[in-house]
Image (cartoon, rainbow, N blue to C red):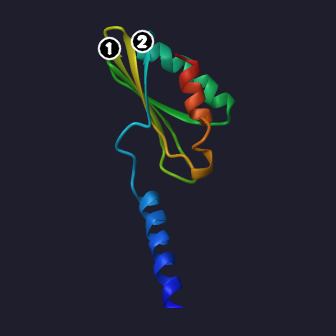
Amino acid sequence: MRSLFVPVMAVASLLLAGCASAPNDPTLILQTSKAPDVYVQCVVPKLQKNALTPTVSQSSRHVRVVVTSKIAADNVLEAYKVSTGGKVFLYERKPLASTFKPSRFEQVAQECL
């Protein structure tokens, strides 16, 4: 019984650690020739078309789009103004099964470049 307990506890602690921690590093960094506000004007309708509900906040040099997730940390897209257009950072938590193909969130971000 004890030989089964240790591996089960190890796996359980790894799973819980993955759920409890928020991503600090972007999962994807993109460059666009569009200004952040123009880029987000493309992204938001496409997210809504995919049944996602984005919340947008904006400053003079930065736009942030947050899509609430029911099973993981919120997905965040941040677009910053740079001299050549915009730099886009994606922060996304993917379920393990979907790490092999881009999510709808990532697809939309790349389509609007």
Q: Please give left or right for residue 36 compared with residue 102 in the image.
A: left
- Image spot of residue 43 (x, y percent): 55, 23
Which numbered disc, 2 or 1, marks the residue closer to the eye?
A: 1
| Residue type of the residue flagged with mark 1 | Val
In depth, the one of 66 and 87 nearer the eye is 87
Residue 78 position (above or below residue 69) = above
Residue neighbourhood size for the residue with mark 1, other residues' Cα within 10 Å, grouped as few (<14), some (14–19), many (≥20): some
Residue at x 39%, y 16% (from the top left corner): 86
Q: Which residue lies most toward the front here?
A: 3
Quarter of the image containing the N terminus? bottom right
Q: Position of residue 10 (x, y in %)?
A: 45, 72
Q: How far apart are the two marked residues, 2 and 1, measured between alpha carbons?
A: 8 Å
Residue at left 34%, top 44%? 24
**Which residue does the numbered mark 2 point to in the structure image?**
35
Residue 85: x %, y % from top left: 39, 10
Residue 60 image point, x, y percent? 32, 18
Dot 2 or dot 1: first in sequence order is 2
In the depicted view, which residue is nearer to us: 5 or 81? 5
Quarter of the image holding residue 59? top left
